Image: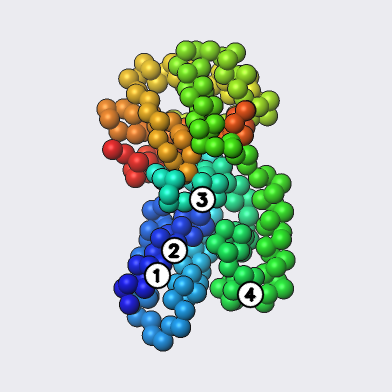
Amino acid sequence: MSDAFLAHRPSLFALAYRMLGSAAEAEDIVQEAWLRWREAEGVESPRAWLSTVVTRLCLDALKSARARRETYVGPWLPEPIATSAEEIDPETVSLAFLTVLERLTPVERAAYLLHAVFDYSHSEVASILARDEATVRQIYHRAKSRVTEARPRFAPSKEAHARLLEGFALACTNGDVAGLRAMLADDVVAWSDGGGKRRAALNPVFGSDAVSRLFVGLAKKGGADGHDVAFVEVNGWPALALKLQGRIDTVVAIQTDGERIYAVYVVVNPDKLGRLAD
């Protein structure tokens, strides 16, 4: 029985993480699914049964999570996780994509992920969500429309992504505001998540001029504080990790098409960086 659960565990975590944007909460959901699995009897399809349990637990968790986020200090960003190319689909686990999913209701998020990312049929999704198939199709198409409207851009390769990221880091380090501005889209947005536990912008910063000045200024302060910069893979794409005394205390990720940077995501909330600390 444990072998069947372990065989599905990676996909269960992948589903829960994409549903919640939190690795810690996803682990809790998967653990709860395991406890329920141990007590289950007569399960004909372990995949369907476990996916149903995880999805419904996530829907319950999202209800309380949304209430907590109403009082969250500043923008809320997904928890970054370390990844490797062999493990995941980089586009559907990216911080950019997970941020777009925040536009959806919990049920829309479940319907979209189950069908578009995890290849469940509409009939299977209907069973998981305990709704009729026609309703599920409507929910999915509504969610798909919202995702398409704000769908993030992706570089053609991780190498192209890394080149923009390296240029971004170099311009910040050199205090090159003009050079950094040239890499940014005119409507670039910078998001900072400190959760009230670290100093961070309380609102998104818009526009290439404001964003370039913001990050050049932050780089100067970071250098004075003795931070080291390392390149790591986070959520499927290269990202910057700022280290203080050998531990990661800031992650900077970008959304880029390989030519311009359209969004910058900065996570400094220590509660979201523990899994990346080394």
* SS label for mark 3: loop
- Is residue 201 in sight in this rendering? no
Q: Going 62% across and 25% down the picture, which residue do you hit?
A: 184
Residue receiving disc 4: 123
* Front of the two marks 3 and 4: 3
Q: Earlier in the sequence, mark 3 or mark 1?
A: 1
Indicate left or right for 56 with 189 as reference: left
**Residue assigned mark 1:** 33
Crowding at dot 2, Cα within 10 Å, few <14 / some 14-19 / many 20+, comes out as many
Look at the picture and state if 44 lies above or below 3. Answer: below
The one nearer the camera, 116 or 35, is 116
Q: How is the image coloured?
A: rainbow
N-terminal of the pair, mark 3 or mark 2, is 2
Callout 3 environment at 10 Å: few (<14), some (14 to 19), or many (20+)?
some
Between label 3 and label 1, give the one nearer the viewer.
3
Q: CA distance from mark 2 to mark 4?
A: 19 Å
- Crowding near the residue tagged with mark 4, few <14, some 14–19, many ≥20 C-alpha atoms within 10 Å: some
Closer to the camera, 264 or 5? 5
Q: CA distance from mark 3 to mark 1?
A: 24 Å
In whole angstroms, how far apart are the C-alphas of marks 1 and 2?
9 Å
On the image, numbered disc 2 is attached to which residue? 12
* Amino acid type of the residue tagged 2 in the rendering: Leu
Separation of residues labelled 4 and 1 (CA atoms): 22 Å
Q: What amino acid is found at the position of numbered circle 3 in the picture?
A: Asp
Where residue 6 appears, as percent x and y from the top left, is 35, 67
Kind of residue at disc 1? Ala
Q: Determine the CA span between mark 3 and mark 2.
A: 15 Å
Residue 162's place in the image compared with 53, above or below, is: above
Image coordinates for residue 141, horizontal then vertical, percent: 71, 61
| Residue 161 badge | none
